[in-house]
Image (cartoon, rainbow, N blue to C red):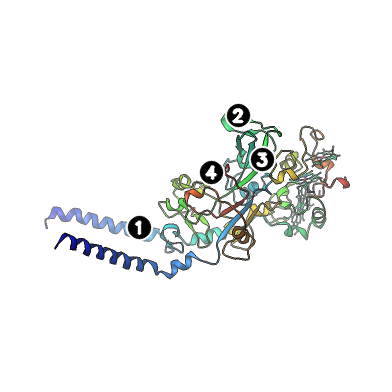
Amino acid sequence: MKKHVWRPLWVVVVLVVIILLARWVYVPADFGVQDRGYTFGYHRLGNEKEWQAQTPRYQGNNYCADCHEEQTARLAGGSHLDFPCENCHSAAGEHPTKPEKLAIDRSRALCLRCHVKLFMPSSGRNTIPGIDPERHNGTGDCVDCHNPHKPNLEEM
Amino acid sequence: MKRRDFLKHAAVFVSGVSVSLSALELIDPKEVLAANPDLRWGFLVDTYKCVGCGFCVKGCKIENDIPLEANVTRTWVERYVMTKNGEVLMDSPRGAQDGYTSKLIDHGASGKKLASDKEIAQAFFVPKLCNQCSTPACVQVCPVGATYQTADGVVLVDRKWCIGCGYCIMGCPYGVRFFHPVEHVADKCTFCYHRISNGKTTACVQACAFGARQIGNLRDPNDPVAKVVMKQRVGVLRDEYGTKPNVYYIGLNEEVR
């Protein structure tokens, strides 16, 4: 074959080799077709481990029980029975190391999420005692009058 | 060769070849096994129990580092109000991360609407999240292999691999994907993969004080979620898209999209 054919051909060959080399360096060994086949499982296997290794922030009520016996007992004995503590105090993370204290939210907004009276038949909302936030005892904090851990009216 | 003979031979040849090809395709034990592992995560939502407090949304955002002030979320709660004269009102202000504290239904540009108690025929909340479909459209459209499904059925995004093209966000019929404002990659509900893989339940399930959300193993006949899915009347969202979603709803009706 003539020179003018070979030259561009070499350029192409070299380019292909470079691209393959770059791919070999860049693409990790665990990248490929995994359990779910080519259509749904073409990925880097190590990424599944990365997701699994993320640290959870929410710990659950059992975690609090040993150190905050009083609140745990009150909650379990009242009408807010098994409410997750962390809904009102935010995620515990590594509390009491980091953070040392959890937030205390005394705002009306916290309670109003559940207690604004909405007419929602065919939903659980209708079973919660509802109030009209404009009318029910002005603008003071709900927790000035109600105990958040045991709001039972007979205990007020 | 006669025309008739040609057609006959051709027919025999084609059917013979296709039979042997499909036989080759069938026997891959690895794929057959992968199609039936003993773990397949599924989700059950009871719309009767949901009160619309939005703690699941807040919990999800904090657990998974989605900024509370950004108007994107991996899970959200919709409110449906059906009036007696057939009108359907729906809203989900900021994904309901602060709950529903007003009777006014936010219709965005067309303003807020109020349905008086007397007009309301039924009203309820519908929590939504990724359906972890069995044939996920979002995974098929990814050009770089950054989003994929694990053997136990969870669709994940490889943040190091994602180029942020946004095809998957467009491809999802349920609109559960969004662009992560901090990581600058596509993001979606992972069923809290870090929690469920380590014996915990998801943040949203844990945050729900009313048992409206449950997660379980659909392959285990003794699993509470699997039992309900098998024995009760449950529905899925947008069945007609053929993505085979794995989030089941109790008390779904056709107005919910």
Give the crowd class for mark 3: few <14, some 14-19, many >=20 residues within 10 Å. Answer: some
Q: Reading the chain from its start, which is encountered first: label 4 or label 3?
A: 3
- State the separation of the CA atoms marked 4 and 2: 27 Å
* Callout 2 and callout 1 share a chain: no
Dot 2 corresponds to which residue? B111
Q: For the residues carrying marks 1 and 4, which lies nearer the camera in this image? A: 4
Task: Find the residue positioned furthest to the front.
Answer: B4
Q: Quadrant of the C terminus of chain B?
A: top right
Dot 1 corresponds to which residue? A22
Q: Reading the chain from its start, which is encountered first: label 4 or label 2?
A: 2
Work out whether B12 lies above or below A129: below
Q: For the residues carrying marks 1 and 3, which lies nearer the camera in this image? A: 3
Find numbered disc 1 in the image and state the secondary structure of the residue it sits on.
helix
Dot 4 corresponds to which residue? B181
Q: For the residues carrying marks 3 and 2, which lies nearer the camera in this image? A: 3
* Callout 4 and callout 3 share a chain: yes
Q: Reading the chain from its start, which is encountered first: label 3 or label 2?
A: 2
Task: Find the residue positioned furthest to the top.
Answer: B110
Q: Position of residue A127 (x, y in %)?
A: 75, 45
Find residue B122 and name its label.
Answer: 3
All told, the count of numbered labels is: 4
